[in-house]
Image (cartoon, helix red, strand yellow):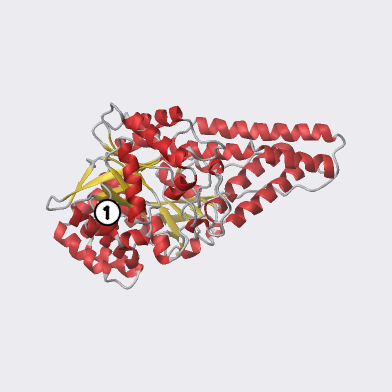
Amino acid sequence: MRELRGIGVSAGTVVGPVARFVRELVEPLAGPAPADPAAEVGRLAAALAETTAELEQRAAAVSGPAAEVLEATALMAADPGLADGAAAAVTDRALPAARAVWEAFAGYREALAGAGGYLAARVADLDDVRDRVVARLLGVPLPGVPDPGHPYVLIAADLAPADTATLRPDVVLAIVTEQGGPTSHTAILANALGIPAVVACPGALSTADGTTVAVDGGAGSVIVQPGQSTVDEYRRRTAARAAARGTVTGVGRTADGAEVALLANIGDAAGMAAAMAAGAGGVGLFRTEFLFLDRNIPPRLAEQVAAYRAVFEQAAGHRVVVRTLDAGADKPLPFLGLEPEPNPALGVRGLRTAVIRPEILAEQLDAIAEAAAGGAADVWVMAPMVSTPDEAAEFVGQAHAAGLRPAGIMVEVPAVALTATACLSEVDFASIGTNDLGQYALAADRQSAALATLTSPWQPGLLQLVALTARAGAELGRPVGVCGEAAGDPGLAVVLVGLGVTSLSMTPRSLAAVSAALASVDLAAARELAARVLAARSADDARELARAALPILADLA
């Protein structure tokens, strides 16, 4: 028995046999020169068109984040710049079509990898498009996941969206990749599909096909050839998580009856349906940027109204917190016309883009207000990347003028937490984004696998900032929620409630475990645990304190 360690990105424990996904496409050669360059360019165009159509068909067959990711990948295949570059390599340099495609994609690949952050995480997506086009040109089988004829744990170097989006949770028990990071498409889609996943796990591919492994997608652990006691423990945990499903009512309660709203994070109407099916009490984070990504012009007012209304119509009697466009940094949008920045994470992003393109925010607020008008959903709106009380006041004033109340802010910048009383005095509510708040507080890129320890939501320094914000909210009578990664961790959810957080928003599949953890402890004990965690020396020490105080976590891992 040996243990491999990676980053857990989708919780759950499973035991099963390994099936490896190893890409076997050989890099095409540069010669011989094509006899008919015009015909070769035609073959190239046809392969790109067929790949685009294949990815669009896959996108149409799924919904939610999977569809959005595949649509974005199809746009890569349809990029005229790639097609023109490859065609030029055929006509000007006498390269065969397959080699021309390989070299054209190489330039784009280098640019993405050098950009870092979100764009660097898209390299695997680009490689997948390249391999599909080249395979068509060479007449070899297209890349695809293994099909051993039984449920299995999928191990790969990395997975592209076209591979991950169509995985069947009843067949693929878990995903383990050697590459990737917390925000890779493997992580996003595994969570959406409810498949336990571990990424950035060195040595995983050395595990032979058929070998039994025990995967803990929360802890980031992969145990190769586990003993029977480990197998029995993992299966007990799996059964406990399954038993907790169906008990969520939208309101979490501690053992003594203290209530906290349990909400879901979504990106579209399909996500809203999943949230309602899971028992969420509403939506704590509606990510509207999915409507804007991979476009050369912003969506029209009518298109925005239709997209928002499709969500609101499913939320009668429920809260829906809409986050206005969170663009820039790791989510670049061409139509914003932003200048290149040496450090985009500290540059023009979130609400700051409204300084450059104020009409986009104004139109979005109008669209949200129109979509909400006459409906039964309780629509709230909040702005990302707010830094000062003046920014908070200006946004809330603009939202109120558009007819949107309550209006609030995301707490992602440490300065807002440190001046929480002044900032929260200007708003109706606040929602803490622990992913970005932790990134800025610890000076560690949250998309870096190498810095995963620093960006842990259990970092006491980060939780001190949460405590400051929650305390100011309680003093001012302003609701303070958490919609970052921390909210879906059952143990950390108890700590957050102990700190005074009034709502928790997470991926729908985490609701049951969080609800069960809250029900196992009374509010006084949660507050006592929170105080001890704040005084911890490290993230690991903080997590261990929670595990010792909350025995139920052993069943909810």
Which residue ends up furthest to the bottom in the rendered image?
537
Residue 48 visible in the shown view:
yes
Residue at 63% over, 42% down: 129
The answer to whether residue 386 is above or below residue 51 is below
| Numbered label tally | 1
Q: Which residue is mark 1?
A: 424
Q: Amino acid at mark 1?
A: Leu
- Between 395 and 349, which is closer to the camera in this rendering? 395
Q: Quadrant of residue 364?
A: top left
Q: Quadrant of residue 277?
A: top left
Q: Is residue 484 left or right of residue 92?
A: left
Residue 368's x, y, as percent? 36, 34
Residue 552 visible in the shown view:
no
Helix, strand or loop at label 1? It is helix
Q: Is residue 233 left or right of residue 148?
A: left
Q: Is residue 144 left or right of residue 200?
A: right
Residue at 15% over, 51% down: 258
How packed is label 1: few (under 14 Cα within 10 Å), some, or many (20 or more)?
many
Which residue ends up furthest to the left in the rendered image?
256
Residue 150's x, y, as percent? 48, 42
Residue 15's x, y, as percent? 41, 52
- Between 34 and 381, which is closer to the camera in this rendering? 381
Residue at 49% over, 30% down: 61
The C terminus lies in quadrant: bottom left
Which residue ends up furthest to the right in the rendered image?
35
The N terminus lies in quadrant: bottom left
Residue 18's x, y, as percent? 50, 51
